[in-house]
Amino acid sequence: MSYSMPELIRTKRDGGVLTAEELKWIITGYTAYRIPDYQLSSLLMAIIFRGLNSRELAAWTDAMLYSGDVLDLSGTSMPKIDKHSTGGVGDKISITLAPLAAACGVAVPMMSGRGLGHTGGTLDKLEAIPGFRTRLEPDVFTRQLDELGLVLAGQSETLAPADRRIYALRDASGTVPSIPLISSSIMSKKLAEDLDGLVLDVKIGSGAWMKDVASGMELAETMVGIGRSHGTPVVGFLTDMDQPLGREVGNANEVIESIAVLRGDGPPDTTELTFRLGEEMLVLGGVAADRAEARSRLEGAVESGSGLEVLAKVIEAQGGDPNVLEDPSLLPSAASVHTVVADRAGFVERCDALAVGRSAVRLGAGRQVKDDDVDPGVGITIHAKVGDPVDVGDALGTVRYNTDDQLGACLQVLETAWVVSEEPQPSRPLILLEVR
């Protein structure tokens, strides 16, 4: 069957329902470059406003899942458990969690994404490591998972190719914050991994795509339902993203902070979230009887250095320089530094994740258009977070930048990120809710 793309766009724009055949035709045509970006962008914007019903979502997800190859990892002896985040500012959990889980006996076939809008991407961070390859062919992906228990890669040309193209287009066309588009993007990638279980980190707050608990619950329940319909157990955690996670926002600097977590010297929030999500992965995989045993094993992987050792082997296997783990100065670093300071004394009431994320994109740590290159060496260090006391002149954040134009654009937003008040602020829980 052949359809008219303008007619399908009008149908969805006007609140109509697209058939499974029409949706499959759209995904197939876009993947094969028969449908141009501008037409799919129009359809994605219509979906932003009109949504997809449950039948449309199932058909859209399946069309993306089967737009290319689906991995057969049945030969992998370890349980295959993955984790995915919906995207946040300073969220480097995949880089800390995946090697720890692998060191504890869980195979992690992690296919990650690039930055979307103001949120960072695991692939961009990993590519800050000199030589690191994130594109692997399916046979290499499978072999490495069998040998090392961990792969940190993106979609190849043949694995979920529809999502790989649509993901980049959503970033550049302002069509990211949609529950159907987010859930189908995540689940098509994850179901293509032939998983035994999946742990989801659904971010809630200023720096997340889901701004409130209600929308986060809807997204988590949607993805848990998609997993259930495909026979894959999925557990979702709603976690706070009103302020950045950890202290570093960027690419190379987030890799450095990830190394610190694996050495047992990372910031408390990043460390705690790594362990909590890891507990669920080990229990889902059946390698730990309960959370207490899982926590003990994860902490042991930090203390023994086995998690760091797994990451070193993966970096080397994927063409990167594992020496960065011992000498982070080998990672890129921007040439200039500027410090944002407090203009009043008190307590930090707000450290706005959205403002920090947008500032990092203006530095070049993310993309403003689809084909932008990412600068791995720029970034922001957060010195003051919610509840911290500050005096006049104290450092709130340090900016690493390469050009004055980048710095100026960054500071227009970054200087609005902090609000200082006279009274101490109560802390917000890191983990808000669980969905099973």
Image (cartoon, rainbow, N blue to C red):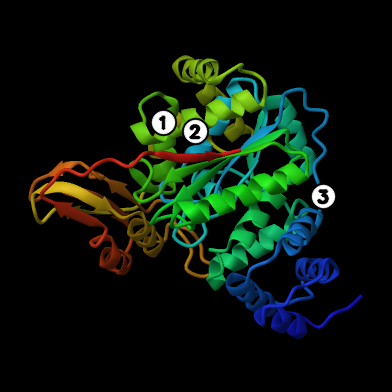
The reply, left or right, for residue 75 in relation to residue 39 is right
The mark nearer the N terminus, 3 or 1, is 3
**How far apart are the alpha carbons under marks 3 and 1?**
35 Å
Badge 3 density bin: few <14, some 14–19, many ≥20, Cα 10 Å: some
The mark nearer the N terminus, 2 or 1, is 2
Q: Position of residue 55 (x, y in %)?
A: 76, 61
The mark nearer the N terminus, 2 or 3, is 3
Residue 385 quadrant: top left
As drawn, the label of residue 69 is 3
Q: Name the residue tied to disc 2.
A: 96
Residue 84 quadrant: top right
The reply, left or right, for residue 126 in relation to residue 180 is left
Q: Position of residue 64 (x, y in %)?
A: 75, 58
Q: Nearer the viewer, residue 228 or 243?
A: 228
For the C terminus, the quadrant is top right
Q: Are the residues tagged 2 and 1 within 8 Å (C-beta)? A: yes
Q: Nearer the viewer, residue 371 or 427?
A: 427
Q: Nearer the viewer, residue 343 or 149?
A: 343
**How far apart are the alpha carbons under marks 2 and 3?**
28 Å
Relative to 125, say whether 151 is above or below. above
Q: Residue at x 28, y 40 (%)?
A: 427
Q: Name the residue tied to disc 1.
A: 271
Amino acid beneath label 1:
Thr
- The number of numbered discs placed on residues in the rendered structure image is 3
Q: Secondary structure at mark 3?
A: loop
Residue 141 visible at all = yes
